[in-house]
Amino acid sequence: MAAAQLNVTTTDIPGLLLLELPVHGDPRGWFKENWQREKMVAAGLPDFGPVQNNISFNAAVGTTRGIHAEPWDKYISVANGRIFGAWVDLRSGEHFGAMATAEITPGQAVFVPRGVGNSFQTLKADTVYTYLVNEHWSADAQSLYTFLNLADPTVAVPWPIPLEKSILSDKDRQHPFLDDVTPMESAPVIILGAAGQLGRALVAHCEREAVPYRAYTRGEWDLAAPDTWPVEDIQGARGVINAAAYTHVDAAETPEGRAAAWAANATGVAALARLCAADGVPLAHVSTDYVFDGTLPVGLEYHAEAPLSPVGVYGQSKAAGELAVRTLPRHWIVRTSWVIGEGPNFVATMKRLAEQGVNPSVVDDQHGRLTFTPDLARVLIDLVIRDKPSGTYHVTSSGPSATWFDIAQWVFEGTGHDPARVTSVTTEDYLRDKPGQAARPTNSKLDLTRLNDAGLAVGDMRQQLTDWLSV
């Protein structure tokens, strides 16, 4: 038996993928790698994290099952025999009602995304139909299904064996026709830390791009108090974006702040990772340049796999949270720096001082790039809904780095004030009369190669700042 090459092709239904599988045979029989995560993800399948394998044995030709749209993804293949498969998009949107069909033997497989109705008809006796799913089946989950009648005249599936001559269950005969089907809504993205600068930008992005979401403030989902979480809300989610954290860098150096930082940034994140793992939900976790000590020569940048080397409590707790997130098969750690959004931040402060006639002294020996929350929100949402490869990504504006002194001058200039009013000062001199301050990284420059390779590049920092100030 000649073995085909692994090949993935798209269909008229977004996300529904057909696969050709290499099947190796000899006089004894045949062998195939039915699911091989590394190869199939590289070929274009999403890394969907299956948790359950089901097998359906069908003794007679003409056995017909479906059309069922379930609240999870499916990977379908045949171990013996042959089927005619039919899939109908039952998700809300422009492709509602779209159909795709194919004959499936042991040399083919199909990836069926959540909300696409799945059905098949056996074309050989003793057909063994097998499928992987990325949620555990339960009786309660059936209330979340969407169904379509196998004989629906609008979709008009071209069954090889007429349905009146097929074997159907009474339940499948009673499913509604397309005009009476309530479309399945897309799985929501869970946003934690919704009241913060980044959280507000995430919500705004979801609303602008019509991405279903559920957002939680600290009062509704406190990372430091896992016993209070509404854990049932995470089931069936498209992904979790953790934009919540303890971020008081200086206060974290106090006894009370140290405990609070570790509770939210480490212990709480570890509990969140366990919850996501148990429910098969991917996690996008926001981290920071403070996981590095910042001593890298200024001409260099920290790459995504650089060893962690935090100095202060804040960075140490965030590094610990990263290690917990890495245990998840499907995760994205997103490190960022110098975040600017709606609310109190460095750019807003410099703009206010310029308008008030204050001439500030700003440090000139810390180097990095700004990150604007709309850009960071867009990347986080894209990582989740486009199911980008798991791993660590650095997200900042692009272009040459700058110091806080440079940026302060740009803000003064960009708001019509004399940039010479800003005076430079070293970090040591700036902190001389300010006891209890945490150490700041001298170099916060993050390498953006992985971000750019993923097609998620962010614009030039100077231009981004100009645009921000013009709004």
Image: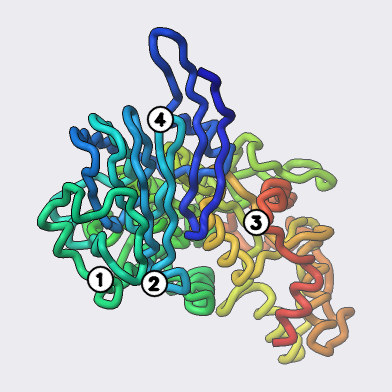
Q: At x 26% / y 63%, what residue is drawn?
A: 151
Query: Between marks 3 and 1, how big is the CA–CA gap?
Result: 47 Å
Q: Is residue 298 left or right of residue 216?
A: right
State the residue position of label 2. Answer: 92
Q: Residues within 10 Å of mark 4 (few under 14, many from 20)?
A: many
Query: Residue 417 or 400: which is nearer the viewer?
Result: 400
Residue 338 coordinates in the image, percent (x, y): 66, 63
State the residue position of label 1. Answer: 177
* Residue type highlighted by circle 4: Pro
Query: Between marks 3 and 2, how big is the CA–CA gap?
Result: 32 Å
Q: For the view shown, which residue lies furthest in the top direction?
A: 27
* Badge nearest the viewer, 4 or 3: 4
- Above or below: residue 282 compared with residue 204: above
Q: Residues within 10 Å of mark 1 (few under 14, many from 20)?
A: some
Per the rendering, the mark at residue 329 is none
* Residue type highlighted by circle 1: Phe
Answer whether labels 3 and 1 touch (C-beta < 8 Å): no
State the residue position of label 3. Answer: 395
State the residue position of label 4. Answer: 106
Q: Is residue 32 left or right of residue 124?
A: right
* Badge nearest the viewer, 1 or 2: 1
Say whether disc 2 or disc 4 marks the residue closer to the N-terminus: 2
Say whether disc 3 or disc 2 marks the residue closer to the N-terminus: 2
Q: At x 71% / y 59%, what residue is drawn?
A: 457
* Residue type highlighted by circle 3: Val
Task: Kindly state the secondary structure of the residue where label 3 is placed.
Answer: loop
